[in-house]
Image: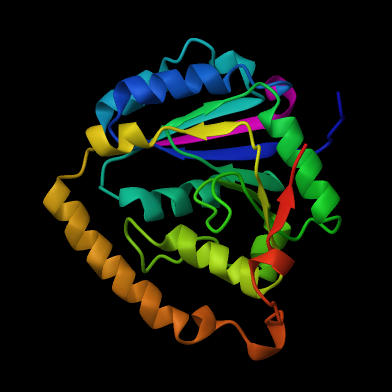
Amino acid sequence: MKYFTDSVGLLLPSKGRYKALLDSLYSLSETEDSDKLLDVLILADQDTESYSIANTFPKRYRFRSYNVVYSAKRLYPVKAFISLYEMCTSRYFCFMNDENSYEPDWLVNALTKFNATFPDKIGLLSLFKKKKAGLGLTTQDFIHYNEGQFYDPEYTLYYSDDELTMRAILLGRYAWSEDSGVFHDERITKTVSAIPWEEKIRLKKLDRGIFYRRSETNFGLKDECIYPWKGFREVNFSLKG
């Protein structure tokens, strides 16, 4: 087993998916060395049921630390993630959701791959798809390098992770893990939601407009910071094994 000295914050906003949240927490609690590495931060977004489930989770002792907070005001995912990030004191942190299950070695493998690819700790490792870090591992070092930005607060529900991904690509600091050991069950997304469908469509259209507007200026990145990448084959490293 590899030895790591820095802890990893895990940011997890609730989405009103009660069984999914509990199942995901049980899977997460089987993570190797979770008692030494994982600082779990959960936000119940105007949702007393999620707060109760997370706050009474019987295996919370398996983590290095475990903190559940309640927001009486509806934040929606982007601002919920930002709120959790502002609470996170770990050098490394992951952004996750309650639709995930985990292989026991997912975290050790992610840290190993991240450090091998980014020895200076400045980077973003997607644990999701090749071209989008919907789930990922990064560091406070990268956020500083990324002009202090994690998710842009202009977004509400969608496209914040698209912008984070694109900024990392433009900075030449993006990689993806093809076999991350993190499994995202999209069936949960389609069948259970705390947000009415019409509201999700409305917010998606608004967030998409923000994304395309911001993309016209490379999301505000300075020209001298932008890496002259030639496409995903060069920048988007595939990390197998």
Q: Quadrant of residue 188?
A: top left
Residue located farthest toward the bottom when viewing the structure as drawn: 223
Q: Quarter of the image holding residue 38?
A: top right
Q: How is the image coloured?
A: rainbow
Instruction: Look at the image and tell me whether residue 192 can be seen.
Output: no
Q: Residue at x 15, y 47 (%)?
A: 197
70 is higher (above) or lower (below) than 198: above
- Residue 36 in magenta stretch: yes
Q: Is residue 170 above or below residue 106?
A: below
Comparing 84 with 122, the one in front is 122
Instruction: Tell me which residue sits at (72%, 48%) in the image.
Output: 91
Boundaries of the magenta span: 34-43
Task: Single out the residue that lies furthest toward the front.
Answer: 233
The residue sitting at 57% across, 38% down in the picture is 10
Which is the main secondary structure of the residues drawn in magenta?
Answer: strand
Q: Where is residue 175 drawn, in percent x and y?
A: 69, 56
Q: Position of residue 238 (x, y in %)?
A: 71, 52
Residue 21 or 205: which is nearer the viewer?
Answer: 205
Tell me: 206 left or right of 131: left
